Amino acid sequence: MLELYMYWSSEIKLFMIQDNLAFALSLFNGMSTGHTALDNVGIKVDKYYSSEIKPHAIKLTQHHYPDTIQVGDVTKWKEWDIDYSTIDMVLSGSPCQDLSIAGKRTGLYGSRSSLFF
């Protein structure tokens, strides 16, 4: 087992993760940095679902992880053919363009950054 420490609400919580996850779901997957991170710490994923809409990111993900199951746009999650009770881990890297100084700085209410809540 791997011990993972996460900072949340001013307290440290300990999470135990097995060396193997049956199913993982990555929202706003991008170029699969979540999958890469799991690989880097030795956690094998049997089935990895990816929610991503950018063609370049999807192509790169499929190149490195050809077994990734692309489910599409996160706003259409009700249409995905996933048994959510089987998901062991949800990863997310929500869009940050509305928060970035390089963007329009519309904040959490911007059209992209508001997607995570």
Image (tube, rainbow, N blue to C red):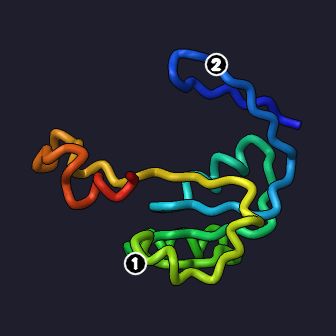
Q: Give the residue displayed 66% in from the left and 77% down from the top.
A: 82
| Three-letter amino acid code at the position of disc 1 | Pro
Mark linked to residue 114: none
Q: Is residue 81 left or right of residue 104?
A: right
- Sequence-wise first label, 2 or 1: 2
Examine the rendered structure and indicate whether residue 78 appears above or below residue 47.
below
Mark in front: 2 vs 1: 2
- Comparing 93 with 56, the one in front is 93
Q: Residue at x 19, y 44 (%)?
A: 107
Q: Between residue 44 and residue 86, name the one nearer to us.
A: 86
Name the residue carrying label 1: 55
Q: Residue 59: tell me if it is visible.
A: no
The quarter in which the N terminus is drawn is: top right
Dot 1 crowding, Cα within 10 Å, few <14, some 14–19, many 20+: few
Residue under the point 79% across and 49% down: 43
Q: Residue type at mark 2?
A: Ile
> Residue drawn at (46%, 51%), measured in percent from left and top?
93
Q: Which mark is residue 12?
A: 2
Q: List x then y, in percent, for residue 116.
A: 39, 53
Q: Quadrant of residue 87?
A: bottom right
Pick out the residue farthest to the left: 104
Indicate the secondary structure of the residue bearing disc 1. helix
Q: Position of residue 69 (x, y in %)?
A: 63, 77
